[in-house]
Image: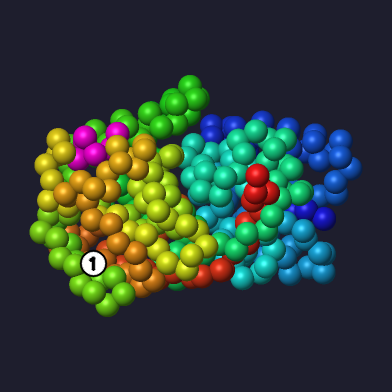
Amino acid sequence: MYLFIVNQRSGNGGGRRVWREISQILDDKGVTYEYQFTESAEGAQAYLKEQLASPVEWKAVGVVGGDGTIHSLLPALRATGIPLAVFPAGSGNDTARGFGIPKKIPAAVDTMLQGLPRIADLISTTGRSTLTALAVGFDAEVADNVNKSRYKKICNALGFGRLAYVIGVFHTLLTFRPADLTVECDGVIHNYSSAWLTAVNNVISYGGGLTICPEAKPDDGVLDICIVHDCSKLQLLLLFPTLLFGKHTRLPFVTMMRGRHISVHSSLSRLALGDGEQIASTPLSVSADPGALMVMCPLPK
């Protein structure tokens, strides 16, 4: 049997529409399933833990929602061996993008029913698990401002989720100041005098498709880090279009590295977002959590 957690409010109500299509397909195929609509992250996590502790043999847990919905369920799913099946219905959907989950609902259902369970790592920090990326600094402030804004709802309603993040960049530039940064990666210390952001990634993108760490792989046991430092506001603005295609990595004010254990210290307190959800602030200790999750992925072509 399959278990579903459905966030009806994700993507400005898109989760409701997606679930209707999924349930109709499952009914037509004669697939047995249980489902629960989320009222809160805490309630969804408690319900999932209760169901996974029952004697039912769950084939997969389907999550209808965005990256934040999936993030809230990671503590219950971690190390259970029960695969996560992703049905993208949020504004960013970087989890779906990172694992090649189809946007079309029938294909996503087929991935759950006939796909390949794939081992995935998690990002562990301050007792919390993150699946896609940990954003620290300017990028986290952008995402936080977007999440709190009215323009996110408008952009989602118009089908231009990425536009909200573009607006958020200009919004955040009005008040954000770069700061001294120290990043320790697997015992090697790196100092930056004027850092804007530190992204620690498990998949290639964040922020709704910004390819911040183009070499990242979710099952290699290491984390990819991107640090943007020692640049002007104009250079920072010019950086963001290059993130759409991962062409920023050779810029002189961009440093890329990889590691299993990372610490981040900033002279100014920096917000940290995991999967787009606020989880902590600097100083941070981050580590890879290899093979902690299973994700249903499309069969190789």
Say if 241 sits above or below 260 in the image.
above
Q: Can residue 92 be seen here?
A: yes
Residue 158, image x, y percentages:
48, 22
Residue 88 shown left or right of residue 223 in the figure: right
As rendered, which of 243 and 162 lies closer to the eye? 243
Quarter of the image for residue 23 reads top right
| Numbered circles on residues, count | 1
* Residue at position x 52%, y 55% in the image: 71
Say if 170 sits above or below 134 in the image.
above
* Residue at position x 40%, y 53% in the image: 215
* Residue at position x 27%, y 77% in the image: 187
As rendered, which of 167 and 292 lies closer to the eye? 292
Q: Residues within 10 Å of mark 1 (few under 14, many from 20)?
A: many
Which residue corresponds to mark 1?
183
Which SS does the magenta portion mostly show?
Answer: helix
Magenta stretch bounds:
236-241
Amino acid at pointer 1: Val
**From the image, which quarter does the C terminus lie in?**
top right
SS for callout 1: strand
Residue 217, image x, y percentages:
47, 57
Say if 186 sits above or below 21 in the image.
below
Residue that sits furthest to the front in the current view: 301
Residue 134 shown left or right of residue 241 in the figure: right
As rendered, which of 123 and 54 lies closer to the eye? 123
Residue 256, image x, y percentages:
28, 57
Q: Can residue 277 be seen here?
A: no
Residue that sits furthest to the bottom in the current view: 187
Residue that sits furthest to the right in the current view: 30
In reply to whether residue 207 is colored magenta, the answer given is: no
**From the image, which quarter does the N terminus lie in?**
bottom right
